[in-house]
Amino acid sequence: MKIYCCKEHVELALDVFVDEEETFPALCTVDNPNDLSTTCEYCSSTSAYIVENA
Ligand SMILES: [Zn+2]
């Protein structure tokens, strides 16, 4: 799975990932947030991190 999240929701995204995948994720930063139209999964902010399979 892959979760886009803002700085406020990164801990929530990590919790959801561990709960669903039962393993720890890789946490990647979004380098060019202005170029990415994807928003946070949990609010309407621009995503700052991507939580995905390591
Ligand atoms: Zn958010």
Image (cartoon, rainbow, N blue to C red):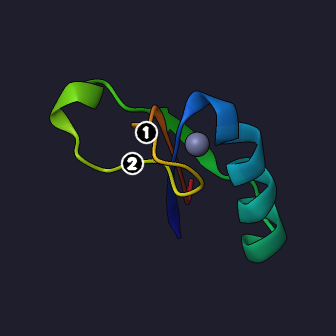
Circles 2 and 1 in contact, beta carbons < 8 Å: yes
Residue matched to label 1: 47
Q: Is residue 28 above or below residue 39?
A: above
Few, some or many C-alpha atoms within 10 Å of disc 1 (few <14, some 14-19, many ≥20)? many
Residue found 46% across the figure and 31% down from its top: 48
Q: Is residue 24 left or right of residue 46?
A: right
Query: At label 2, which amino acid type do we have?
Result: Thr
Q: Residue lying farthest front?
A: 44
Task: Say what secondary structure mark 2 lies in.
Answer: loop
Residue found 31% across the figure and 24% down from its top: 31
- Look at the numbered disc 1 and say if its residue's Cβ is closer than 8 Å to ligand 1: yes
Residue matched to label 2: 39
Q: Is residue 47 above or below residue 1?
A: above
Question: In the rendering, at what x and y percent does residue 34 appear?
Answer: 21, 27
Question: Which of disc 1 and disc 2 is earlier in sequence?
Answer: 2
Q: CA distance from mark 2 to mark 1?
A: 5 Å
Few, some or many C-alpha atoms within 10 Å of disc 2 (few <14, some 14-19, many ≥20)? some
- Look at the numbered disc 2 and say if its residue's Cβ is closer than 8 Å to ligand 1: yes
Camera-side residue of 21 and 54? 21
Q: Is residue 40 above or below residue 7?
A: below
Camera-side residue of 44 and 51? 44
